[in-house]
Amino acid sequence: MAYLAQSIQEQRFGPKDKSTLLDLKGTHFRFLVYFAHFILLVRALRAMLSNAALSNQVPPPTPAFGFAWKGQQYLLSHPKLWAVGVCYILLAALIGVVALIILMAAALEPQAETFGGGEFGWIMGVLVVLVGEFR
């Protein structure tokens, strides 16, 4: 039983007699990698703080929704891009309508029959097809 526990421990942490730093699978190497990343992070933070202290012109952070707002402002302020935007919107709408027509033609009747036919079956069939289209 002790041999099994020692074998499991060696598989997880490596043999006890290995203490070299050149063991690429051991915990020592992982520690060195994590330590190197920590040193790089500290250096980057120091550089950022020293640059911010020197310039005193750090822009305020932009919230996530601010990027979409800036993109919309840029698009609206450049009329040359309007044609490209309208083309992509029309193409997406066309693909959506074609997909909806194909799904209504192919899947509406089987969905309605699955729900037992009748008015309830057809209403549920339409809802299931729409949910399948827009999910």
Image: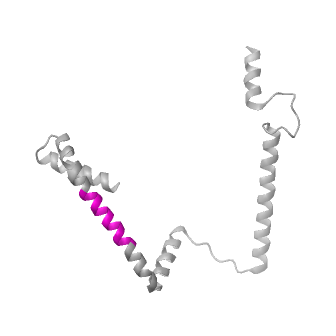
Quarter of the N terminus within the rendering: top right
Q: Foreground: 64 or 132?
A: 132
* Colour theme: one colour
- Which of the 4 image quadrants contains residue 43? bottom right
Where is residue 102 shown, x and y percent of the image? 25, 55
On screen, residue 86 versus residue 115, left or right, reads right
All told, the count of numbered labels is 0
Where is residue 22 shown, x and y percent of the image? 86, 40
Where is residue 14 shown, x and y percent of the image? 79, 30
Quarter of the C terminus within the rendering: bottom left
Q: Which residues are magenta?
A: 88-101
The question of residue 97 being in magenta is answered with yes
Residue found 74% across the figure and 27% down from its top = 11
- Which of the 4 image quadrants contains residue 98? bottom left
Residue 40 to residue 54: above or below: above
On screen, residue 70 versus residue 100, left or right, reads right
Q: Which residue occupies the extreme top position in the image?
A: 1
On screen, residue 112 versus residue 53, left or right, reads left
On screen, residue 99 versus residue 82, left or right, reads left
Residue 115 to residue 84: above or below: above
Q: Foreground: 52 or 76?
A: 76
Residue found 88% across the figure and 34% down from its top = 19
Secondary structure mostly seen in magenta is: helix
Residue found 87% across the figure and 28% down from its top = 17
Q: Which residue occupies the extreme left position in the image?
A: 118
Residue 60 to residue 104: above or below: below
The question of residue 67 being in magenta is answered with no
Residue found 80% across the figure and 39% down from its top = 24
Residue 104 to residue 4: above or below: below
